Amino acid sequence: MLVLGIETSCDETAVALVDSAADGGQRRIRANLVLSQLAEHAPYGGVVPEIAARSHLAALPDLVRQALATAGVTWEEIDGIAATAGPGLIGGVFVGVVLAKALAAARGLPFIGVNHLEGHALTVRLTDGLPYPYLLLLVSGGHCQLVAVEGLGRYRPYGATLDDAAGEAFDKTAKLLGLGYPGGPAVEQAARDGDPARFALPRPMLGRPELDFSFAGLKTAVRQAAERLPREDRQARADLAASFQAAVAAVLADRAGRALVRFRAETGQAGPLVVAGGVAANATLRAALAATAARAGTRLVAPPPALCTDNAAMIAWAGLERLAAGQRDPLDLPARPRWPLAEMTLEQAA
């Protein structure tokens, strides 16, 4: 089974082709093209939705052609077309969904509207062949949540952010410290030369029995500390970046550790712990989560960094899983700016 995937939920225009044997084995990424819009959005310090949508519209048709050429396949070999139908910036989502529907209609192929979050949640099944169930920590610019992944379309939320997502906090910290955009890689780079113990930053929700997150207070503390620093003191800014990164890693590791206890109690299994989303590419976070998983008697499973950030391979794979389960979406399926994982159902894959 060979599926073409389209991802346009934010500021990456992405197209991929993924296939799998009938039994789910021999999974292959035949093409995985990602066109960044960093240059367009960098002057604004963040993603401008209208610019993102126009860039998707301009780049997507040619990127589809390039993906087919890269994979060396023809339209006759493709079994279905999947596109992110939400959540995300609605203009960009709409561009990808409309093109996917048009291609599906023109070629007589099934269309599958994929939940972007489900794409992240299932990436480890593409990269590692991981069986259900597992505990997922999803950390990105717009999302921060813990979810028990029990099967296709079966996602039980454990906790979510009460305010800001971890990735948003990274972007804000980078902006406050003058580190550039995108914020996550910029903070990680600066933190390599910093002392993570120099600034006593808060660790919101640390030790709390509930499994939610909060990063607004940490962002405020970073802003207050940054305002007191001389602009030219590069070492101090590196130290603040390292202190911030350490605080986020500590909070995420604590929340994940407590979630593993609940997961074991409910499923009888220790794990594994899966981390996905753009922030999952951060090496300090991965190390903290790996240590947490080891203490809980399980292991951390994380996709390669290139498949943590937004990409179309994860959308193609999620579409492939649902296509294999019998899903065919109607061509009037709407694009959705919001689409919680908890709203996914088994019936959608029936």
Image (tube, grey):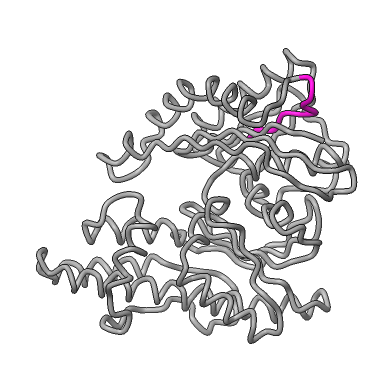
Q: Is residue 78 magenta?
A: yes
**Residue 78 vertical position relative to residue 134 in the rendered view, above or below:** above
Q: Tell me which corner region of the image, top left, top right, bottom left or bottom right, holds residue 186.
A: bottom left
**Residue 86 vertical position relative to residue 342 in the rendered view, above or below:** above
Judge from the rendering whether residue 105 lies leftward or rightward of residue 196; answer left or right.
right
**Residue 225 vertical position relative to residue 51 in the rendered view, above or below:** below
Segment colored magenta = 76-85
Residue at the spot 11% in from the left edge and 64% down from the top edge: 231
Q: Tell me which corner region of the image, top left, top right, bottom left or bottom right, holds residue 291.
A: bottom right
Q: Is residue 82 magenta?
A: yes
x then y, percent, for residue 303: 61, 58
Residue at the spot 81% in from the left edge and 56% down from the top edge: 151
Image quadrant containing the C terminus: top right
x then y, percent, for residue 215: 42, 67
* Residue sitting nearer the eye, 178 or 161: 178
**Residue 297 vertical position relative to residue 168 in the rendered view, above or below:** below
x then y, percent, for residue 36: 43, 38
User: Does residue 84 show up?
Assistant: no
Q: Please give the count of numbered marks on the rendered protein.
A: 0
x then y, percent, for residue 1: 82, 36
* Residue sitting nearer the eye, 253 or 146: 253
* Residue sitting nearer the eye, 165 or 183: 183
Judge from the rendering whether residue 234 lies leftward or rightward of residue 222; answer left or right.
left
Residue at the spot 42% in from the left edge and 26% down from the top edge: 55
Residue at the spot 75% in from the left edge and 27% down from the top edge: 111
